[in-house]
Amino acid sequence: MPSDESIYCYHCRRYHPREEMRRIETKGSKKWRCINSIEATKKSTTQRDAFGKSVTAINKSDSQARIKSRVNAERLVAGR
Ligand SMILES: [Zn+2]
């Protein structure tokens, strides 16, 4: 076996050294994809998730602040 064996990466549409490749399963067929592209996808997914979570957190704290101010207003009314 030649050590410089390269495998076609369907994601980059080019050949990479075998040690940079991972075999992944897509809809019943097995394809080769390089670790770099897998990691890049993972990273962008994580960033998207983090963004989505921070938006959710902002929305949550916003509505909590609104609830709190409403409760305070009700207290003021009740205190009279
Ligand atoms: Zn690749």
Image (tube, grey):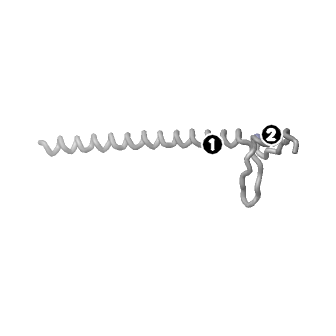
Outermost right residue: 2
Determine which quarter of the picture holds residue 67: top left
| Residue located at (52% from left, 40% from top) | 50
- Of residues 54 and 65, the one drawn nearer to the viewer in this rendering: 54
Look at the picture and state if 31 lies above or below 37.
below
Whether the residue under disc 2 has CB within 8 Å of ligand 1: no
Identify the secondary structure beneath mark 2: strand
User: Residue 35: x and y, percent?
Assistant: 71, 41
Q: Residue at x 79, y 46 (%)?
A: 10
Labels 2 & 1 near each other (Cβ < 8 A): no
- Badge 1: residue crowd in 10 Å (few <14, some 14–19, many ≥20): few
Real-space CA distance between mark 2 and mark 1, rounded to the nearest whole angstrom: 21 Å
The residue mark sitting in front, 2 or 1, is: 2
- Locate residue 41: give its quadrant: top right
Q: Quadrant of the N terminus?
A: top right
Query: Amino acid type of disc 2?
Result: Pro
Q: Does residue 67 appear left or right of residue 19 in this picture? A: left
For the C terminus, the image quarter is top left
Residue 25, how many percent across, how many down?
72, 55
Residue 58: image location, x then y, percent: 42, 39
Q: Nearer the viewer, residue 45 or 8?
A: 8
Q: Which residue is mark 2?
A: 17
Q: Quadrant of ligand 1?
A: top right
Residue topped by disc 1: 42
The amino acid type of the residue labelled 1 equals Lys
Residue at disc 1, secondary structure: helix
Mark earlier in primary sequence (2, 1): 2
